[in-house]
Image (cartoon, rainbow, N blue to C red):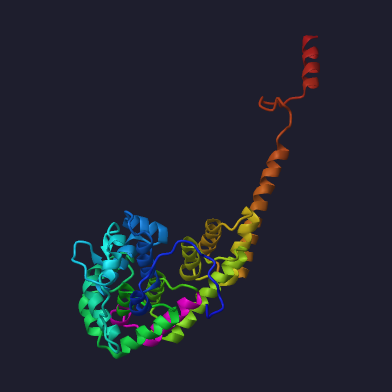
């Protein structure tokens, strides 16, 4: 190879059409290419969507989107359709059992307006699905006011002629290092047109997620909605918000000695509660984490939450308030312990203590009795 590598896998091979490599692979996402290669590899076998999803670590919805994409591109066709000559003739038998055959490849998009045509063609197929997902997203947010998606098809058709939006899609794909699917294009259209996020803010959104190693549209969507709900409108506001959140999370994870991973969903909710709802600073939260480790020997977020909830109820705002609360508690415990000690000392250790003790002098009683008898 010209790159200086040699192939260490010299076993049975799967042939891939040069037309597919030259004309279709470059504009498709990696997930879609994986699905197509899987179909080629298992040619002649009875392959079902759940099998593909499990083998490629995809969801079944991801596989269906990939198959729909290749159908729209003309690379795959339902086996019920009449195949064309050329590539289909060479691969018809291989893919019949998988449910798809590959007709002769054809170019669907022009050069300069390829992005716009992709948006228009994909919108017709994905519009209803995306509207439903975004409505569900709005319902899941509960009291958080997330706008409804509206008509995705009309929006995508309108934005296909928007040069600013096309430039935005190009920029964010460069940041994330991948070519967008129809779903991903629609999500950014939603952020841009419905949430009214500026191009500058959305570019920073892609940059921020990519720097954290997150390129999933689900993660990007979650961050975008958090920013929207926080009233963030500019790049500077987003940077300040992200920096503060990162510092807060880092402080907690460091205090608990958790290294090498990000905070989980439940852990993030605890952290949000402590800093956002309770309004504590990192010094107070760190002190609670340290006390948790001392008491339990583990990084218990629920235990730390009990400590901080108690401090919140007692009006704690600073570490000095924590010290004052500790002193009051110690004094109360000392007073209680002192009362208990006095009660213990006043109680006889005689094992017959349950009986009522006599209140007279026995010797005097005896002598009085003798005198009376005389």
Q: Which residues are magenta?
A: 190-212
Query: Residue 160: where, in percent of width, then height?
Result: 25, 84
In this rendering, position of residue 333 left or right of residue 153? right
Question: Which of 119 and 299 lies nearest the eye of the viewer?
Answer: 119
Question: Which of 168 and 287 lies nearest the eye of the viewer?
Answer: 168
Query: Residue 179: where, in percent of width, then height?
Result: 38, 78
Question: Which of 299 and 157 lies nearest the eye of the viewer?
Answer: 157
Magenta segment: does it hold 201? yes
The quadrant in which residue 154 appears is bottom left
Query: Is most of the magenta stretch helix, strand or loop?
Result: helix
Image position of 99 with respect to 351: above or below? below
In this rendering, position of residue 208 left or right of residue 88? right
In this rendering, position of residue 347 left or right of residue 310? right
How many labels were placed on the picture? 0
* Quadrant the C terminus occupies: top right
Question: Which of 202 and 314 lies nearest the eye of the viewer?
Answer: 202
Residue 332 visible to the viewer? no
Query: Residue 324: where, in percent of width, then height?
Result: 62, 65
The quadrant in which residue 252 appears is bottom right
Image position of 188 with respect to 368: above or below? below
Residue 241 visible to the viewer? yes
Q: Residue at x 29, y 84 (%)?
A: 114
Image position of 265 with respect to 106: above or below? above
Query: Residue 128: where, in percent of width, then height?
Result: 22, 69
Q: Residue at x 32, y 77 (%)?
A: 185
Q: Residue at x 67, y 44 (%)?
A: 340
Magenta segment: does it hold 10? no
């Amino acid at each position: 190879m010209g790159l200086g590598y040699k192939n260490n896998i010299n076993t049975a091979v799967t042939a891939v059409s040069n037309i597919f490599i030259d004309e279709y692979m470059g504009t498709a996402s990696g997930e879609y290419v994986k699905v197509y290669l899987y179909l080629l590899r298992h040619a002649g076998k009875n392959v079902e969507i759940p099998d593909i999803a499990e083998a490629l670590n995809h969801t079944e919805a991801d596989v269906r989107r990939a198959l729909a994409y290749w159908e729209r591109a003309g690379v795959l066709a339902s086996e019920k359709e009449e195949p064309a000559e050329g590539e289909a003739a060479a691969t018809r038998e291989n893919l019949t059992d998988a449910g798809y055959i590959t007709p002769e490849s054809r170019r669907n998009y022009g050069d300069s307006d390829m992005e716009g045509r992709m948006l228009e063609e994909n919108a017709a197929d994905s519009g209803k699905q995306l509207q439903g997902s975004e409505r569900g997203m709005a319902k899941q947010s509960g009291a958080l006011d997330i706008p409804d998606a509206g008509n995705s098809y009309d929006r995508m058709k309108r934005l296909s002629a928007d040069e600013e939006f096309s430039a935005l899609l190009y920029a964010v794909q460069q940041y994330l290092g991948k070519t967008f699917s129809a779903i991903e294009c629609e999500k950014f259209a939603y952020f841009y047109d419905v949430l009214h996020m500026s191009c500058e803010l959305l570019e920073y959104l892609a940059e921020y997620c990519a720097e954290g190693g997150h390129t999933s549209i689900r993660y990007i969507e979650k961050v975008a909605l958090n920013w929207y709900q926080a009233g963030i409108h500019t790049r500077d506001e987003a940077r300040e918000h992200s920096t503060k959140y990162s510092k807060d999370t880092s402080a907690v994870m460091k205090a608990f000695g958790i290294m090498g991973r990000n905070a989980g969903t439940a852990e993030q909710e605890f952290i949000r509660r402590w800093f956002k709802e309770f309004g504590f600073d990192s010094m107070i939260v760190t002190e609670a984490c340290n006390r948790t480790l001392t008491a339990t020997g583990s990084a218990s977020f629920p235990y730390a939450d009990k400590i901080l909830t108690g401090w919140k109820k007692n009006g704690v705002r600073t570490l000095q308030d924590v010290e004052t609360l500790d002193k009051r508690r110690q004094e109360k415990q000392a007073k209680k312990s002192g009362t208990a000690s006095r009660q213990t000392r006043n109680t006889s250790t005689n094992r017959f203590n349950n009986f009522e003790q006599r209140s007279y002098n026995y010797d005097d009683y005896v002598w009085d009795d003798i005198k009376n008898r005389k």
